[in-house]
Image (cartoon, grey):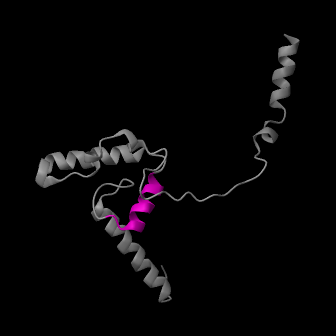
């Protein structure tokens, strides 16, 4: 029992020293446009869910598919990388990073408007 107390008390004396990283490494992960993002939640999901076509499956089914795809994106650890990649490529169709094509176009227009304000010297 005394040995157990020593182990426990010794382990909790300086936990912050053990948790400190030795060095900080910054890296940029650039996804390969010809493949999927590693760690994406959608990796095993049918891709048709992310590209709903109202003319093919009907408006109600397409709306359901879009909501379901966005729910999948909501919990994805690489959601922001996926969205950034779709915005960079100006992806015209589908759900990427939790946004559909209209929502991505809105983000791009807002970013362009903010850039023009900054370049014109206005307050963003």
What residue is at 42 percent from the left and 52 percent from the top?
Answer: 35
The magenta-colored residue range is 79-91
What residue is at 49 percent from the left and 86 percent from the top?
Answer: 119
Which image quadrant is residue 92 in?
bottom left
Residue at the farthest front position: 34
Q: Quadrant of the N terminus?
A: top right
Q: Position of residue 12 (x, y in %)?
A: 80, 30
Q: Is residue 24 left or right of residue 94?
A: right
Q: Position of residue 61 (x, y in %)?
A: 16, 45
Magenta highlight on residue 78: no
Q: Is residue 119 left or right of residue 10?
A: left
Q: Give the vertical position of 76 relative to 89 (above or below).
A: above
Q: Is residue 62 left or right of residue 17?
A: left
Which image quadrant is residue 5 in?
top right
- Secondary structure, magenta segment, majority class: helix
What residue is at 29 percent from the left and 62 percent from the top?
Answer: 101
Residue at the farthest bottom position: 120
Q: Give the vertical position of 115 relative to 71 (above or below).
A: below
Which image quadrant is residue 75 in?
top left
Q: Position of residue 24 (x, y in %)?
A: 73, 54
Q: Nearer the viewer, residue 26 or 67?
A: 26
């Amino acid at each position: 029992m005394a040995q157990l107390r020593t182990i426990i008390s010794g382990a909790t004396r300086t936990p912050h020293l053990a948790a400190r990283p030795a060095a900080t490494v910054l890296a940029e992960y650039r996804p390969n446009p010809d493949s999927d993002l590693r760690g994406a939640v959608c990796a095993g999901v049918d891709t048709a869910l992310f590209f709903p076509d109202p003319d093919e499956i009907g408006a109600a089914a397409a709306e359901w598919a879009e909501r379901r795809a966005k729910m999948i994106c909501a919990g994805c650890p690489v959601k922001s990388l996926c969205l950034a990649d779709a915005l960079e490529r100006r992806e015209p169709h589908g759900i990427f990073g939790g946004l559909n094509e209209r929502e991505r176009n809105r983000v791009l227009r807002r970013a362009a408007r903010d850039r023009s304000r900054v370049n014109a010297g206005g307050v963003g």
